[in-house]
Image (cartoon, rainbow, N blue to C red):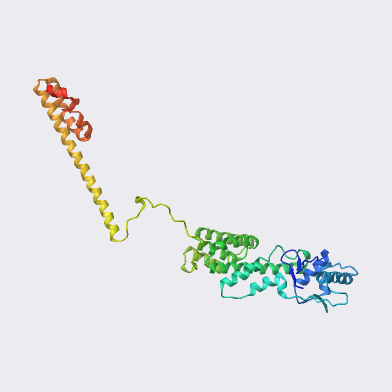
Amino acid sequence: MGLRFRILGPLEVESDAGPVDTGTPKQRAVLAMLATQPGRIVSVQRLIDELWADEPPERAIASLQAYVSRLRRALEPGRTARDRSAVLVSRAPGYVLQVPADSVDAARLAAAVEQVTADPHAALTALTAALELWRGDPLPELGESPLARAERGRLVELRLTALERHSEALLSLGRASEVVYRTESALAEAPYRERLWAQLILALYRTGRQADAMSAYARARQGLIDELGIEPGPELQQLAQDVLRQAPHLAGPPSAAPTSAPPVPTSAPPASAVPPPPGHRGDAWRAGRRARGARRAGRAAADRRSAHRRGGGRARAAAARLRITGHRQDGAAAGGRGARGRAGACRDRGRGGRRGAAGVPALGADPARDRRW
């Protein structure tokens, strides 16, 4: 019968037939202590010290033996009273949980962390599976005993190391964006872990967020100074300098390819948005535009000069007509204002074409008047 023990969270035991009832809190504590060291002897005295601290009862050994007996029945329900236990074994000076190491989730996590491989894909697969074993604070059955604190510290360290190596594999595969949110979550639990900060800074830089990378370094440095009174280590400081000067070796592998191709435009862009062709054809295109602009400007200047000449000639003709008819008074006024009429015609083409000097209607403005003249 295969048994699987889970201590990366509340204690759980599962057999091929389903979950196993491990009984009272004291029984669960005994089994949890044995599961932290599968295949290794845990002494009776240590078990008693962990169960009752400094105040063990008078019949502590008898109580411990009763817990072990009930656990044996739960773990090996088909075993008779005369058969020796093959799982929870008596071995001087205590007991041993005789199961394969990989039947305990904490041992599988440790094996994944200790595994050395040059293939980032294999490392990522193994570490991902190992990290999924973590279900919460380990060994709550042991309370705050010295063994519980030491074992929790070991397991937490294993998990953080697994997270760091998992992030390394992701960075090696060009998946920096995944590292950002994973390390931010881990740093909330371990804010002084400089290796996690370095991975976050590098991941931010590789996703085009240089300013955020420097902001992350500032947070790391400020936290270390405020809480511990120390500066970041040399490696983290050097990384910050490399980010500032955009060191080429920080680029890393290309980002992972998108899962789907970008959408194809349904219509062509407007002609104005199409850039000129490269090379000498583009230069000729720009030169042609400049030439066409110069021709338009020349035509506009010629039109202004023509309008100026037409306006001045009409004003002089109107003044001559006034002198011929003998209107001296009006002629004198027209003579005084003739120059101003000519200047006004230069400034205002439209007005010069419609009116003569000093407000006298120009030829063509009133056909009946033209016949009288």
Relative side of 221 to 309, left or right: right
Image x and y of residue 86, in percent: 80, 77
Q: Residue furthest right?
A: 58
Q: Quadrant of the N terminus?
A: bottom right
Name the residue nearer the viewer: 54 or 103: 103
Tell me which residue sits at (20%, 29%) in the image: 354
Q: Quadrant of the C terminus?
A: top left
Q: Count the labels in the image.
A: 0
Residue 24 seen in render = yes
Name the residue nearer the viewer: 209 or 99: 99
* Above or below, 114 relative to 180: below
Residue 317's quadrant in the figure?
Answer: top left
Residue 78's quadrant in the figure?
Answer: bottom right
Image x and y of residue 39, in percent: 76, 77
Residue 53 seen in render = no
Relative side of 339 to 268, left or right: left
Name the residue nearer the viewer: 244 or 320: 320
Tell me which residue sits at (57%, 69%) in the image: 169
Image x and y of residue 213, in percent: 53, 60
Name the residue nearer the viewer: 296 or 348: 296
Tell me which residue sits at (15%, 26%) in the image: 336
Image x and y of residue 143, in percent: 78, 64
Relative side of 164 to 362, left or right: right
Q: Residue furthest bottom?
A: 92
